[in-house]
């Protein structure tokens, strides 16, 4: 009878201890997972904060700069008023020029420029020029920011503002348009500095060129190419080496 009583007591103790042991085992199994989870969050937290604290990079990289030469209009007007070609009388000049620079790579671009306007004295005349050539950015890691050089071939044609008898006689030059219409073929080089703030573009620039002109009457005496001169005639169609200076001074425009 004593043995039966002891057996009953032991059985009751085992039944009460099993859930507790199982619960303790479950806590032991789950506790490492709960202990490790905060470590993963701690490791991810600072990294995420670093990513968020990095400043955003400038994603804008312009490929084209479109510009005008704002000082060229005033310079040509003043030059016309100061000129006094043979025959007397100052020349009224209304002129404008501009262009575009297209990036072919990080440092190399292709520049295209045009200019033109009206001349008035005894009659109406006109001037037109077009140039194209490569440019190279020498300093700076960003497009249109830094020192650059630009070279180009430029063709210029103009009719001085003075009446002359015209004919179809030829002087055997290229693009012969007849007497009274001067034309010049020039190789030019500019040195400037790109300045850019976002899309705003500005570049001070100076240049020089040399070439050959047909039907050009040199009124300067130093072979300087100027539209403020007398036109050639059917009896006098001079030609020769000329030089030029880019006094446009600065580009002003937009980077796109």
Image (cartoon, rainbow, N blue to C red):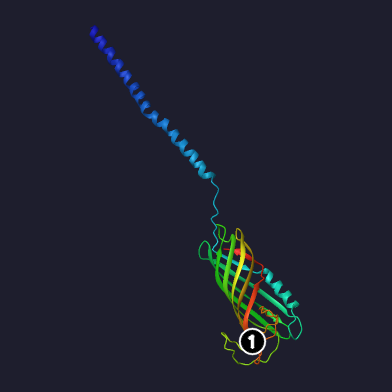
Question: In the rendered view, would you say 178 is above or below 39?
Answer: below
Quarter of the image containing the N terminus? top left
Question: In the rendered view, would you say 222 is above or below 139?
Answer: below
| Residue found 31% across the figure and 15% down from its top | 13
| Whole-percent x, y for residue 154 in the image | 59, 76
| Whole-percent x, y for residue 63 in the image | 54, 63
Where on the picture, by quarter, is residue 247? bottom right
| Residue found 50% across the figure and 39% down from its top | 46
Where on the picture, by quarter, is residue 202? bottom right
- Secondary structure state at the residue bearing disc 1: loop
| Whole-percent x, y for residue 228 in the image | 70, 80
Query: Is 256 placed left or right of 222 in the picture?
Result: left
Outermost residue to the front: 222
Q: Check disc 1 and report the residue beneath it.
A: 238
Quarter of the image containing the C terminus? bottom right
In front of the other: 192 or 241: 241
Query: Is 183 placed left or right of 14 in the picture?
Result: right
Where on the picture, by quarter, is residue 33? top left
In front of the other: 141 or 236: 236
**Numbered-mark total:** 1
| Whole-percent x, y for residue 34 in the image | 41, 31
Query: Is 9 placed left or right of 169 in the picture?
Result: left
Question: In the rendered view, would you say 116 is above or below 178?
Answer: above
In front of the other: 47 or 236: 236
């Amino acid at each position: 009878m004593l043995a039966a009583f002891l057996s009953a007591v032991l059985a009751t103790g085992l039944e009460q201890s099993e859930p507790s042991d199982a619960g303790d085992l479950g806590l032991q199994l789950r506790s490492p997972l709960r202990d490790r989870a905060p470590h993963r969050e701690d490791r991810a937290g600072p990294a995420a904060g670093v990513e968020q604290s990095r400043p955003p990079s400038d994603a804008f990289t312009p490929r084209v700069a479109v510009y005008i030469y704002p000082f060229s209009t005033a310079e040509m007007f003043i030059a016309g008023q100061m000129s006094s070609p043979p025959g007397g009388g100052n020349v009224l000049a209304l002129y404008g020029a501009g262009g575009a620079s297209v990036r072919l790579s990080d440092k190399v671009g292709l520049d295209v420029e045009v200019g033109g306007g009206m001349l008035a004295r005894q009659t109406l005349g006109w001037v037109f020029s077009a140039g194209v050539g490569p440019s190279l950015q020498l300093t700076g890691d960003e497009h249109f920011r830094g020192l650059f050089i630009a070279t180009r071939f430029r063709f210029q044609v103009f009719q001085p503002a003075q009446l002359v008898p015209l004919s179809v006689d030829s002087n055997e030059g290229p693009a012969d348009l007849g007497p009274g219409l001067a034309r010049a073929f020039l190789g030019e080089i500019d040195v400037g500095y790109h300045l850019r703030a976002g899309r705003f573009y500005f570049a001070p620039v100076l240049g020089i060129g040399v070439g050959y002109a047909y039907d050009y009457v040199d009124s300067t005496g130093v072979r300087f190419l100027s539209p403020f001169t007398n036109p050639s005639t059917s009896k006098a169609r001079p030609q020769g080496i000329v030089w030029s200076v880019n006094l446009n001074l600065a580009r002003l425009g937009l980077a796109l």
